[in-house]
Amino acid sequence: MTGATTGTAAGAEHGAAGTDSADAAAGVGGAAAPMGGAGPVGEAGAVGAAGVPAGTSPRTHGAAGPGEPDRTSVSARPATAQDAEAASEGLPDLLPDRWRPGNNRRSFVAESGGTVLGHCRGIDNDFHPASRSLVLETVPGFDDDLRCRVEDALLGAQIAVSTVPLRMKVYASDAAGRALAARHRAVAIQACPPWRYRVGPELRQWAAAHRHADDAESGALGAGRGGAAEPDVPCPVRPADVEELRDLEVAHYTAQHARWSPAAAPEVLRDELGEAYNGPAGTLGLDVERSVVLRRGGRLVAAGVVWPSEEHVTGPGAEVSLLSDPAEGPTARADKEACLAAVLDRCQDGDVLCLDSHLTERTEIAMMREVPGLDPAAGDGWMVILDVPVGRERRPWTLPAALVPDEASWIREFIPGASDSGSS
């Protein structure tokens, strides 16, 4: 957290496409790749430390030094255009309060003695109307006590003006973020595994055994693009597939989040996904060289969507979303395996893929446990999605503790009534 930022997916998982870059940072704008951001949409937020604003000394204690303001008292207030201009170097994401109409966009700064020490934004999430994405940044260099007071003032201000839970994403290594969430009674609603794979012989051997997706319900062979009966083999994505592919993602996304974070209406999701699938100058936003689709009976039933490579908590890699309709069912696993195998066949040795998934997706969790080649460097990449309660609203759906593996036992800290034994 100190040295990070709390904002997103797909914030959270997906940021709502079609909004400005400021909203993207907040987790409701732009197409964010999943892995700690899942695919092209958004769910949560980011918390962290930013650069030091001009004229502000990164002292390591709260007491004022010669010529410095007294920092023993910290308060929060709505951010102004002057705040944003003055902090443009040290806190470049700082925006004035209500910088755009709609979505209850609120921006606050924490200050002491007239010096801005941090900022936060809260934005109602277009993808998940019952949640609010959070971005929070502090100036680095202060001791734990001062940093905590700045964070608490900022988050408290957002809680006071919010009508739905604020959503955060916190990683295992983020001790400060975990502490902030605990102080404000955050509840775990989901967890994402650190599935980061480096393409090599092991993965290629697995792919060779999973290239065909037989129809598990009838045993019949699917109809390929030519209409003839043939094994269900994924094909490269074409521009003509994009509209149907977007419909598939809407169906998959809606089912994927139904229990723990209900998504917006399908027509809203489809509009928000437009920016993710349609890149600049008529290009596609996805990686067309490695993305694949699977058809059965002339209908698109599954896909392996690869997004352009970017930096993740566990290192650089390309995000991969495995989609199917139905999201869970007798054909889902084989269809996703065939799509992943086809993606791997289109990768070079050494390529890094980050698989986007959730702990509650049991079919996919069981499938990925049998896929070799997990990068050991991804071990500390478990991420929890948290809801920070506001007002008197009903407690959100809680992640079942029994699903949390021992390697991510810290997540149980945010599950009421759970113990380190992993019981529910």
Image: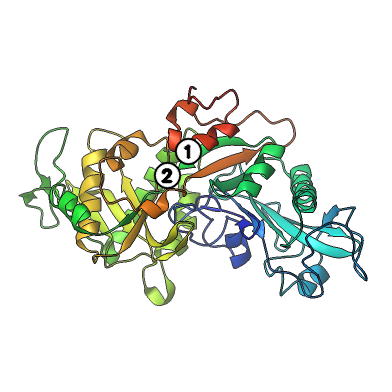
Q: Residue furthest bottom?
A: 281
Position in image of residue 139 (x %, y %): 73, 63
User: According to the image, label 1 marks what residue?
Assistant: 408
Nearest to N terminus: mark 2 or mark 1: 2
State whether residue 416 is above or below residue 317: above
Q: Is residue 258 visible to us here?
A: yes
Mark number displayed over residue 193:
2
Mark 1 Cα-neighbour bin, 10 Å: few <14, some 14–19, many ≥20: some
**How far apart, in angstroms, are the residues tagged by discs 2 and 1?**
9 Å
> Where, by quadrant of the figure, is residue 21 drawn?
bottom right
Position in image of residue 147 (x %, y %): 76, 53
Foreground disc of the pair 2, 1: 1
| Amino acid type assigned to the residue bearing label 1 in the image | Ala
State whether residue 169 is above or below residue 198: above
Mark 2 Cα-neighbour bin, 10 Å: few <14, some 14–19, many ≥20: many
Q: Is residue 132 visible to us here?
A: no
Q: Quadrant of the N terminus?
A: bottom right
